[in-house]
Amino acid sequence: MQNLQAVRPLTSRRRDSNEIAYSIIRSAYEGERKTRIMYRAGLNLHQLNGYLALLMEKGMAELGPDKRYRATEKGKKFITAFERYSQTRQILNEQTLVLSDFWSAAPKKAAVLESSLSLGK
């Protein structure tokens, strides 16, 4: 099972509803009780109940006769789509950093070049 923290960025920020839904569905993938899901997803009971109701209404999770929540086929497709989205977001974040290096480094190099040219006069 993939570590749920791996999809979060290095900087601290609030999770959006997709990240929370992913945490819940991933925790319940093969069948899990509500308390375990709550702890794995990092939610309180009130929050978890709201999300579980929504996920069940949307057909992404179901409650089995053994009182365990499970991911449905639709929920499993959501997990796959969210993991692809997270990978793409990580690549974009890395490329944004690479591009920002060009902008932050360019003025310094231009200033050094300009000062070296003025010394040569």
Image: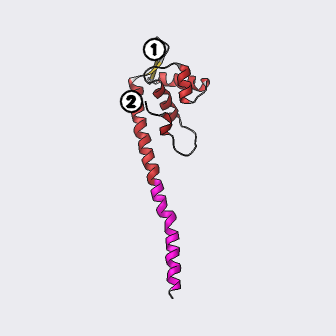
Q: Which mark sits nearer the N-terminus, 1 or 2?
A: 1
Name the residue beneath numbered marker 1. Answer: 64
> Where are the magenta residues, as a range?
96-119
In what element is the residue under mark 2? helix
Rate crowding at label 2 as few (under 14), some (14 to 19) or many (20 or more) other CA atoms within 10 Å: few
Q: Label 1 amino acid?
A: Gly
Pick the residue in front: 51 or 3.
3
Identity of the residue furthest to the bottom in this view? 121
Vertical comparison of 17 with 46: above or below = below
Residue contact between numbered discs 1 and 2, judged by CB atoms under 8 Å: no
Instruction: Give me the residue at 48% from left, 55% from top.
Output: 97
> Quick check: 86 left or right of 53?
left
Q: Label 2 amino acid?
A: Lys
Dot label at residue 45: none
Name the residue beneath numbered marker 2. Answer: 77
Instruction: Give me the residue at 46% from left, 28% from top.
Output: 26
Percent coordinates x, y for residue 31 in the rendering: 45, 19
Percent coordinates x, y for residue 61 in the rendering: 46, 22
Vertical comparison of 9 with 25: above or below = below
Vertical comparison of 87 with 101: above or below = above
Rate crowding at label 1 as few (under 14), some (14 to 19) or many (20 or more) other CA atoms within 10 Å: few
In what element is the residue under mark 1? loop
Percent coordinates x, y for residue 30 in the rendering: 42, 21
Q: CA distance from mark 1 to mark 2?
A: 19 Å
Quarter of the image for residue 76 reads top left
Pick the residue in front: 57 or 112.
112
- Look at the image and say whether residue 100 sits in the magenta stretch: yes
Identity of the residue furthest to the top in this view? 65
The quarter of the rendered structure image containing the N terminus is top left
Instruction: Give me the residue at 56% from left, 25% from top.
Output: 38
